[in-house]
Amino acid sequence: MGTGVLTVDLNAIAANWRALDRASASGVQTAAVVKADAYGLGVARVARALAAAGARRFFVATAEEGATLRQSLGPGPQINILSGHLAGDTDMIGDLDLTPMLNSIDQITRHLEGLPGAGFGIQLDTGMNRLGMKELEWEAVAPFVLDAGPELIMSHLACADEPDNPMNHGQLILFQAMTEGTGVPRSLAATGGILLGPKYHFDLTRPGVGLYGGAPFTGAAPVVRLSLPVIQTHEVNAGETVGYAQGWMADLPTITATVSGGYADGLGRALSNKATLWDGDTPCPLIGRVSMDLITVDITHLPQVPDYLDIIGPYQGVDQLAEVAGTIGYEILTSLGPRYRRQYRKEEA
Ligand SMILES: *Cc1c(COP(=O)(O)O)cnc(C)c1O
């Protein structure tokens, strides 16, 4: 086998959803964010596991993602589109019963004219300046929009992973002011917002990264294991170098393993000479530069050549690898490339 194996633990995803569901009061609905192919893990299997765990409402970024998701889930669960209703989306939204979160007056007009009577939600901007209507815009259209019966009003926190950042409270106060008395279900919290406490939960929460085992949900069950096959070993003499640009030089005689996986698979060049791979519980340093398809590892200290080395696993989670790469867990997950063999673990209850 020449490609890495990405093992996704569906039971852990379901357990993380239940844990985040329990973190809010019983009247609060917990949705699931499965945009970007369920953060790179494979939306079809992940969404079905979440539906089986009890999730009834899903969020994706685009109508195209919503169409793919509808095929996996079938009719029933609500699918919300964060980018709203764009030109060209109307047939897909109507035919597949997708619910756009309308972000602007243009989108509201397009939706109400193109699909009269079809469900929709509203997204408000409370300071992030990314998606949604601002206060004055919303004030101008609210009476008319509320008449048309939105199913949900939401906004998004810019700094929810920093509990002490005053931006959180500022967005909360503004969201309350913009939505008080509308009688429409409201949502402000993603994973970080859930952890900020009940004031942020309103009627519905929208966790994404926490489902997949990522920070800031530090209590999450780990979901991902990434094992890279050893495809060759080399005996490197002292003074010889390894890889492109002589990225590493041996001080002592060294045995190296070349494993399958590289920057084309989401293991970025920033990991060069920095990351650690694991043979079970034994760390093995990544040496030299990460290349497109291959990584070299020092295994001199191992008693035998392993079949696989883990780059994500029990001893190094997604967030720890992200830290070495100078990025965040979200980017590691969503960069995991299409070449891995995705393998899903699900023990029958
Ligand atoms: C991505 C996203 C989420 C999920 O965020 P996490 O931090 O992954 O929990 C929720 N709401 C919106 C608007 C998003 O863009």
Image (cartoon, rainbow, N blue to C red):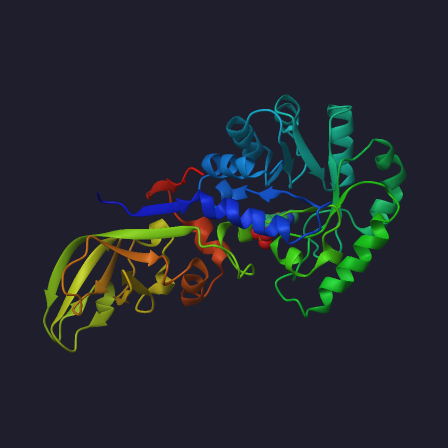
State which quarter of the image contains the C terminus. Answer: top left
* Residue 344 visible in rendering: yes
Residue 120 to residue 26: above or below: above
Q: Is residue 216 left or right of residue 260?
A: right
Quadrant position of the N terminus in the picture: top left
Q: Where does the image place residue 339, in percent across and percent down from the top left?
A: 33, 43
Residue at position x 23%, y 63% from top? 297
Residue 293 appears in the figure? no
Tell me: 86 left or right of 215.
right
Closest to the observer: 1 or 247? 1
Residue at the extreme front: 349
Is 261 above or below relative to 122?
Answer: below
Residue pictured at 72% horizontal, 57% vertical:
198
How many marks the image carries: the answer is 0
Q: Position of residue 233 (x, y in %)?
A: 14, 58
Where's residue 185, x and y in %? 78, 42
The furthest residue to the bottom: 251
Quadrant for residue 243, please give it.
Answer: bottom left
Residue at image point 54% right, 42% down: 34
Is 5 or 156 nearer to us in this picture? 5
On the image, the x and y values in percent for residue 22 come to 63, 51
